[in-house]
Image (cartoon, grey):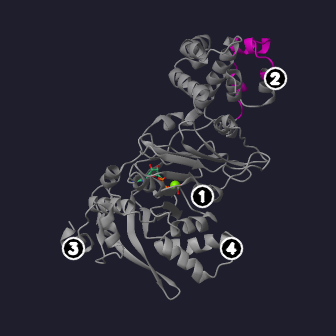
Amino acid sequence: MSLFDRIHKQEGTNGEKKQLKKMPNQTEAENEEEQEPRLEQAPPMSRNPGQERHHELKRLLHKRILNEIKGEEDLDSIISNMESMVADIIKENEAFRGTVDGKRIVEEVINDLTGFGPINPLLLDDEVSEVMVNGPDRVYCERKGKLTLTDIKFRDDEHVLNVIDKIVSPLGRRIDESSPMVDARLPDGSRVNAIIPPLVLNGPTITIRKFAKDPFTISDLVRFGTLTNEMAVFLEACVKAKLNIFVSGGTGSGKTTTLNVLSNFIPHNERIITIEDAAELQLGQEHVISLEARPANIEGKGAITIRQLVKNSLRMRPDRIVIGEVRGAEALDMLQAMNTGHDGSLATGHSNSPRDMIARLETMVLLAGVELPVKAIREQISGALDLIIQQSRLSDGSRKIVSITEVQGMEGDIIVLQDIFTFERQGKDPDGRIKGNLVPTGVLPKFYEKLQTSGIHIPTDVFIEKRDRKE
Ligand SMILES: Nc1ncnc2c1ncn2[C@@H]1O[C@H](COP(=O)(O)OP(=O)(O)OP(=O)(O)O)[C@@H](O)[C@H]1O
Ligand SMILES: [Mg+2]
């Protein structure tokens, strides 16, 4: 989108503004307005007089910028002149004097032009991990695990739509009535979902999961209290010993983050293939091939599914397969791969408990359209998986591993699950944070012998319940 179009878009799309688009160079109408701003012409919205003036000054600034564009775009010089443009407009209009914050207006217009509008400051703030726009008036963000309503507001629905358009159009996608939901990514890799009315009732809605510039490491997770140091060493041994591990948890519980941390334990001499819907994993090893599924294009063609990628990956001589999230028929191919020599594979899935995860995997296998008796499916699952790590987002916003469970095998028709460690809650600290630790259940895992192949010595007393561990 050209600079002109972008500035123009900030103006909205009513008749008067459409006309402006046809006249990129100055027009009489604009000149007239510049000299004689009329506050009553601002779009009728439920704003107080201060907001009306703010909006009107912004509109006049847009118009002045439009006049400044002469042929070649020169964003930098326009931006550097913006403060003096605002100062001029204020000088020319008594109503603005002392009643508007010119600096803020310049900031907002720069955000509209060079960034993603009002949410730009949140996107630039490294402390913010998620941004949620629920229509123009309600913008939430998550900081340190806590969700808060910000005082950021868009002008109207159109303004939100402009930002969505700015995100998706460089990717050759669009959002409109015929395709009212879209997944996209920001240039920095952040994951974006947008959905618009009539599918959503509160106005155009954007959800952004920000891409971590410095992905969390195992020591970060220990520091956050997601797991203990001892558990970290245990899980490192599990990955190095090539156990097949599944990270299970609810939405936003930190599954992908844990998967990323675990994947970084894979030795550097192994060939790793990662398969994801939207590439989020950031592995430190050199020998990594990252595959990414592709949604259908505007004509509904060309989709490549996770399942197709899993099948393809098996022809790429992987030592390890890491699947971002298993949520459909690919479960069958993953289990078959795990059962046929591709040990040490890692994946995540959406579920509230290890038992539930197993049930979901059964359903997913059925989705693959293969007629298998339930018992055979269960045998596939129990033969494939070694360990389920259950993760949860607790009420204080923290993400914790709440159980580490061994998949031990079958007893009759039932898959036997055995918790090795479970989270023991120990109340709250003075700041309201939930205290507690992963403690052993006292059961030595059946794969204990295999752990020795990791080269990391895990003493058996790690698995023995020690009451004196509690603070
Ligand atoms: N152990 C952790 N401690 C604190 N914050 C975390 C932890 N793990 C992840 N987060 C934060 O929580 C958010 C969600 O993390 P992540 O993407 O890993 O979750 P997820 O379960 O994969 O989510 P989804 O279900 O959407 O795929 C991110 O903003 C991330 O920075
Ligand atoms: Mg995830």
Q: What residue did someone put label 2 on?
A: 19
Q: Earlier in the sequence, mark 4 or mark 1?
A: 1
Most extreme residue toward the bottom is 412
Q: What residue did someone put label 4 on?
A: 370
Under circle 3, the secondary element is: loop
Q: Residue at x 43, y 63 (%)?
A: 391
In which quarter of the view is residue 262 placed? Answer: bottom left
Q: Nearer the viewer, residue 86 or 76?
A: 76
Other-residue count near label 2 (Cα within 10 Å), few / some / many at <14 / 14–19 / ≥20: few
Under circle 4, the secondary element is: loop
What amino acid is at disc 4? Answer: Val
Residue 218 visible somewhere in the drawing: yes
Q: Earlier in the sequence, mark 1 or mark 2?
A: 2
Q: Earlier in the sequence, mark 2 or mark 3?
A: 2
Task: Evaluate if marks 4 and 1 touch, with contact meaning CB atoms under 8 Å apart.
Answer: no
Q: Report the span colored magenta.
A: 21-44
Q: What residue did someone put label 3 on?
A: 466
Measured as percent of width and height from the top left, residue 287 is found at: 46, 46
Task: Evaluate if marks 2 and 3 touch, with contact meaning CB atoms under 8 Å apart.
Answer: no
Magenta segment includes 40 = yes
Q: Residue at x 72, y 43 (%)?
A: 175
Task: Evaluate if marks 2 and 4 touch, with contact meaning CB atoms under 8 Å apart.
Answer: no
